[in-house]
Image: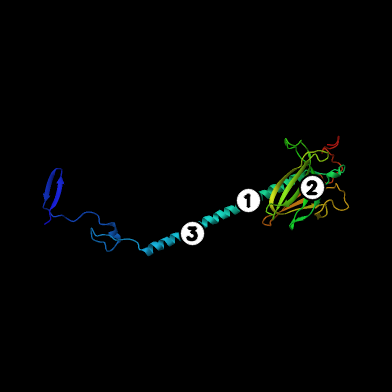
Amino acid sequence: MSTAFRSVGLLSVVSTTPPGPSRRAPCIHARLHPLATNPGEKCELGFTLLEILLALSVLSVILLLLLSAFTGAAKIRETLSSRAREFRQIRLVLDRVGTDLMCAFATSAREESALSLREDQLSGMPAATLTFTAFQIPDGDSGHPPAEIVKIRYFPRIGADGVTLELHREQSDLPFIGNKIPLRESPVADRLRGFGVEVYDGTAWVKEWPAGGGSKTALPKKIAVTLVDERGETYRREVPIRLAGQEGTVTRSGRRPAGKP
């Protein structure tokens, strides 16, 4: 018969009652492992090396798929951002050229006010040069005197990469008087595949101006500007010339003669 000892305070009590069955919950692994059924039995539940390798393989595949998804999303985002920048550049250039052309004029009293267009190619890409005189609101640049009449020239150059074109805008202030005001040149677009200009003389679109046999100071009815982006997509805008046909009534200052509304 077994003897159980208990300590209560400072007293030692000897019990001759045999121990009963343990009321402790059996090992939790015993509920999972069919062999560990008796209380106190050692549980040897675990994973084999093959199971661990299989789990790692599945986890690697999942991580690889997630990485591919994130990488694809980043590339799509970069592509969309690049396309947005290209569209913004094209829109700004067409708006700028259109605004300048809407204010274009020429006067028969000054031949140097005539509009001229020359079609050319650079590295096999369309490269037109457009020059015209226009009215503009003085910009208030401290380095230049205020001028309401300017000479504007749009022309392309080979870009820094040697493959695409850069479009430049050149402005000459007070072009009808002798002055030493420096020209203002600035790039307005890059990474283009072409810059084309056509003028409408009332009957057909032509790529050279002045047209043969016509007045040098005559203005076309419309001007179409075409830009070709790096991907080869074409964007075109037609701008009506408001002062076309009024070359004999436009004065150098841009003001109408006295007595006329």
- Callout 1: SS: helix
The part of the image, by quadrant, that contains residue 173 is top right
Q: Which colour scheme is used?
A: rainbow
Dot 3 crowding, Cα within 10 Å, few <14, some 14–19, many 20+:
few
Q: Is residue 54 above or below residue 225?
A: below
The part of the image, by quadrant, that contains residue 172 is top right
The part of the image, by quadrant, that contains residue 75 is bottom right
Judging by the rendered image, the residue that carries numbered circle 1 is: 84
Q: Are marks 2 and 1 in contact (CB under 8 Å)?
A: no
- Position of the N terminus by quadrant: bottom left
- Callout 2: SS: strand
* Amino acid type at image mark 3: Leu
Circle number at residue 64: 3
Q: How many marks?
A: 3
Dot 1 crowding, Cα within 10 Å, few <14, some 14–19, many 20+:
few
- Callout 3: SS: helix
Q: Distance between the residues labelled 2 and 1?
A: 30 Å
Q: How far apart are marks 3 and 2 (CA)?
A: 57 Å
Front-lying residue, 68 or 184 = 184
Front-lying residue, 16 or 190 = 190
Judging by the rendered image, the residue that carries numbered circle 2 is: 131
Q: Residue at x 47, y 58 (%)?
A: 63
Q: Distance between the residues labelled 3 and 1?
A: 30 Å
| Residue 129, image x, y percentages | 78, 50
Query: Is residue 241 visible from the viewing direction of this image?
Result: no
- Position of the C terminus by quadrant: top right
